[in-house]
Image (cartoon, grey):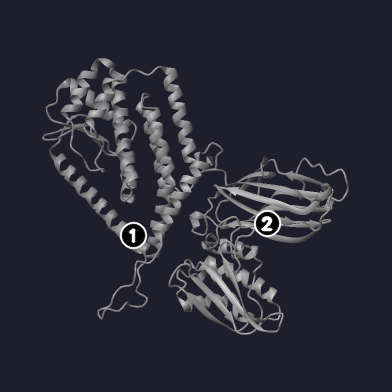
Amino acid sequence: MTGLTELFGGMLHRSAAALPVMAAVLLARLCLRRAPKRFGFVLWAAVGFRLLCPAGLPSPVSIFNSPPVQAAQQTALAAARRLEGGPTGAAVSGGGAAAAGSGVSAAEVLTAVWLAGLAVMLAWSAVSYLRIRRRLAQAEMLEPGVFACPGLETPFALGVFRRRIYVPAGMEPETLRCVLLHERAHLRRLDPLWKLAAFLVLAVYWWDPAVWLCHRLFCRDMEMSCDEAVLRELGPEVKRTYSLSLLSFAAGRRFPAAPPAFGEHDAKPRVKNVLRWKRAAPPAAFLAGSLAVILTVSLCTDAPAGSWVRVRPAQGSEGVGASVSSRLNAPIRSWVIYQDVYDHGTLISSEPRILDGFEEDGTGASSRSLRGELLCSPGYGAGGALDGTVACVFRSDGVSIRWTAELPQSGYQGAGMASGDGRTALNGAGEAVLLTYVFSEREGGVTLRSADTDIVQLCDAAVRFRLAASEEPLSAAGGASALAEELYALKNPYVGNIPADGKLLTALGVPALGNYSLELITSRRPYVLTVNFQHAPEDPNALDSEMSARAAALLALIENLDEVRWAYPQEDENGEPVQITVYFDAAAARLASLDQPVKTYGSSPQALEELLSAWGLSAPAAG
């Protein structure tokens, strides 16, 4: 079953990836509604190609170069992946207990349903074909390749190798003339073959309503284009006769696998199209045909392969920096923007500042078409000298992340900025430099006009931001730490769950800070968790600092927790014993580098890692 499940999963992904192509074809049909229908008919080849082929040749004119199209495709792919996964529960044994190891995944259930539907579609088509062949047993040849059959509802063309036209017996000569021109147009274009291929696609994707809609419009365009072929041959004088023929042979709803029939597929719109038909002027036909060919190529090709980053200088109210856009293709699974600080050409620190996985993989919130703006503003102290800090902000999709970069020292006299200016591929390590701020101890400042990989070697100090992409998940790519992953796994919705609270406190290393007892207030708001230490700390300030970091993490991870307190015995100035209690709530958890409510940082391991890093909590305290 595994192979079939993978096959069905691939079709789910292709169906999602084809949605933008279907939408583009539907829109193009509206734009070409006054053009000859044969041009709109050609566009359906792109839909069939996308449903059958996982990828196309790279092209600069591909519709998938457009960020909105990429975003729509990725959203659809994410939905397809969510539909694939997840267990549906375990089978129940006769005694009522769940049978161990008998779980059936949602993907396996969906695959079984798909196979059943496919079998029904193929069986139905086989029965329909046998019925048609049985009815044609009484057909008599009128002329080579044309047969008359008593009781036939509508004319049609049949066969791929032995191509024949079947018509009802006793047709009027003028009507027969129009019908034969129509059906011969089908045979000349191999429409029976294309309709069979379209049916097989429909049978495979029978569960997709978008494919049913496309199949219906494909068949309508096929018939209308043959109608127009007749009018081009006989002229507008036969419009009335031809329209009456369509109405007289208007067939009921036919099975999708039936051969192309003269009177099928919406006689009303076909008659309207015949009555308003005009012979297209050569320039207009050439323009419509050119547009159809260009659009078909655009829909059947992919964006150029390979991941890339485009960086352009940017300026805003919060500083000067770079506008960043990128395309990070699979198998990349995560990305990180690192902040590297250099002192006289030597790297002294490297910190991940912004990091995420991808929505389509279920590992983050980013699309593979990442866009953002990175702005920096050096701080100035008294006398106009730089104070050794750089205020930074990264904006993407309406979210702003702020932090402060610390320089090796204060007192620099000049600063300059270098950013990229164009599109570049990621280097062999999967990285690209986005922005470099450089600083000089000499008066007169620094002026830079282009990025240089060795620029940090020429300056007294530098802060460089680089994008690093990885095929590993964030925890392995320098994103969420093991501590963040462990804490997130212990996330607790209710502070009243004492065992869960205890696990979080242990993971945070609170027992290493001293023996304690736990006290909860859950009878009314605010809900409070209090850690009562039994012994006086050697350094109360150090304990308060350690507990503040842990309290921020607790507020993020216990969803209904409003306040954390910790208490410890101490002696006052007279040597009398007193109890010191520290109160810590969401307002206290806000730092300059954290611009979101503390609860936000409990939404993912990556967000929690940002909180832990801001509070300097990288590992539990040692015992």
The quadrant where residue 112 appears? bottom left
Give left or right: position of 582 versus 264: right
Front-lying residue, 263 or 319: 319
For residue 152, above or below residue 569: above
Amino acid residing under circle 2: Tyr
Instruction: Tell me, for residue 110, which label it has, or none.
Output: 1
The quadrant of the image that shows the C terminus is bottom right
Give percent across and percent down for residue 255: 23, 43
In the rendered image, residue 402, in percent from the top left (x then y), is placed at 64, 53
- Label 1 with label 2: CB-CB less than 8 Å: no
Residue 526 lies, in percent from the top left, at 48, 67
Q: Is residue 469 visible?
A: no
Residue nearest the viewer, comparing 100 with 356: 356
Q: Residue at x 23, y 17 (%)?
A: 238
Q: Which type of secondary structure does the marked residue at label 1 adopt? A: helix
Label for residue 338?
2
Q: In terms of depth relative to the viewer, which is nearer, 32 or 415?
A: 415
Could you tell whether 572 is left or right of 329 in the image? right
Residue 13 in the image: state x and y as whole percent.
43, 52
Q: Is residue 435 left or right of residue 25?
A: right
Q: Residue at x 40, y 40 (%)?
A: 22
Q: In the displayed image of the protein, which residue is found farthest to the top? A: 237
